[in-house]
Amino acid sequence: MKTHHSTARTCLALMIGILLSAFAACKKSPESIGNNLISENNYIGVYHTDTAEIVCHSYLDSIMTKNATYAMLGAMNDPVFGTTEAGFYTQFRFSVAGQNFGSNPVLDSLVLQLYLGGYYGDTTVMQTARVYKLTDSLSLDATYYNHSTVATEMVDHANGFQFCPHPRTKIHVLNNDTVGQPVIRIPLSQELGEFLMNLDTTAYSRPDLFKKAFPGLYVTCDAVSQNGSVSYINLTSNTFSMLQLYYHNAATPDKPMRYNYHVTSYDTYFNHFDHDYTQGSPEFVSQVLDKQWDLGQSTLYLQTMGGVRARVMFPNLSHWTDSLEGCHLVVNEAKLILPASSALADSSVFGPPVALILLGFNADSTTYLLPDYYEGSGFFGGTYNASTQSVAFRISEYLQSMILEKKENLGLSLGINGAAYNAQRWIVNGPEAETGEKMRLEVTYSLVNE
């Protein structure tokens, strides 16, 4: 046992000697790169810095919204971000081909039923729905963005129907129909119901002919004066979301019938969002609309729905190795820390996002997935941490490639994940925030002899 311990001590001393010799070959101190040398009790030659320069600002976004996970409906009035109205354009298809309503059908009602898959904001605020019939067709091959529009008639077939979404109410009993999930039911005009019922029988022979005869609907909500919410609609759930036409035959009024129209993955729909950012806070307006981008050093703003993203840059990475001779800088770990703003406290109405997304910029302003992303979400990060009120990303491989100038350093695009189908927003403390934790890049690195 005594011989074993002696041998172990000899090997350890030899290894330390080799390491010391290697790092002695570095002719200049790494303190010009990092300012917090790790304790002598830690591994030799490993350093840490959290003072890397960061330059950032928020900017207006634009996203594709065709056939997103959820259609979105509602309106919000945010004291920081201003007003937002969310709606969607959609096609429909008939449920049964060759539909014949009989020789003397009588319309009872037409209802647009929308299955609630979630929400964001204050659902106790009354919403006012508007539904317009499309006059132009949607195309499965077209690209639709958050600002895209399609021509409609002027008639509001919902007649300003008012409702409060009840996203947690699981059972609704509606006349003879029982719905086992939370839904919004918007009664539509007799005019639209009779239009559908009186379509030529050929329109019910093929989906393309039906969509030509009835291009679809635009569903939206009026602005609200305070708070408000946006509901997430599971539009392609044919069990619960549908356009329902109730009718009977004049000869048999005691036998009510129903015919359904659905939206499927083979149909086209897209989300449309109207933002009025001039109603936002002065600080927000100055940075995002007036492009006073130096304000981003204090506060960053993020919003989904083709709203607001942020650009984050590390301008001096290529100079990190300028003072090193005979050594390589190896990034062991790099973490971008994004703390919630304390200067602009959020209310419980507009809570933090579930997760953020971080992408690299190409020269043409398109984006790409960072190499660290492919290590998996558990490594890469991006999920909001409620206990620390922050989000962290590991960007070690990205940072190493920037230091070695393997890719042009054009910065990062920071946004909220799922921007086409959720209504979240967030405010982040910048690297020069006056109060609270600051945005920072924490880097642990080693200096390795060539």
Image (spheres, rainbow, N blue to C red):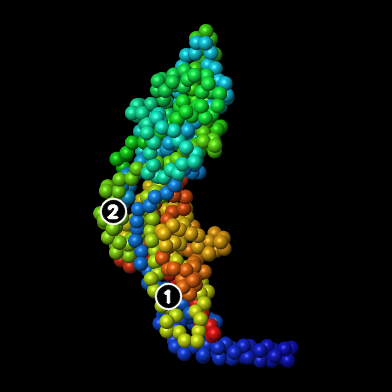
Q: Which residue is mark 2?
A: 289
Depth check: give the residue in front, 309 or 206.
206
Specify the label residue 82 is tagged with: none
Residue 20: percent from left, percent from top: 55, 89
Left/right placement of residue 171 relative to residue 429 reads right
Q: Quadrant of residue 137?
A: top left
Residue at image location 50% in from the left, 39% down from the top: 140
Q: Quadrant of the C terminus?
A: bottom right
Residue at image location 44% in from the left, 88% down from the top: 28
Residue projecting furthest to the top: 251
Residue at image location 48% in from the left, 63% down from the top: 393
Q: Is residue 324 above or below residue 294?
A: below
- The residues bearing labels 2 and 1 have C-alpha atoms spaced at a distance of 32 Å
Q: Indicate the secondary structure of the residue bearing disc 2.
A: helix
Residue type (three-letter) at the residue carrying disc 1: Ser
Depth check: give the residue in front, 43 or 72.
72
Q: Is residue 170 above or below residue 96?
A: below
* Residue 116 is at least partly visible in this image: no
Neighbours of disc 1 within 10 Å: few (<14), some (14-19), many (20+): some
Q: Is residue 380 above or below residue 89?
A: below
Q: Are marks 2 and 1 in contact (CB under 8 Å)?
A: no
* Residue 289 is at least partly visible in this image: yes
Residue type (three-letter) at the residue carrying disc 2: Leu
Q: Which residue is mark 1?
A: 318
Q: Indicate the secondary structure of the residue bearing disc 1.
A: helix
Residue 56: percent from left, percent from top: 36, 64
Which one is in front in this view, the residue at disc 2 or the one at disc 1? Answer: 1
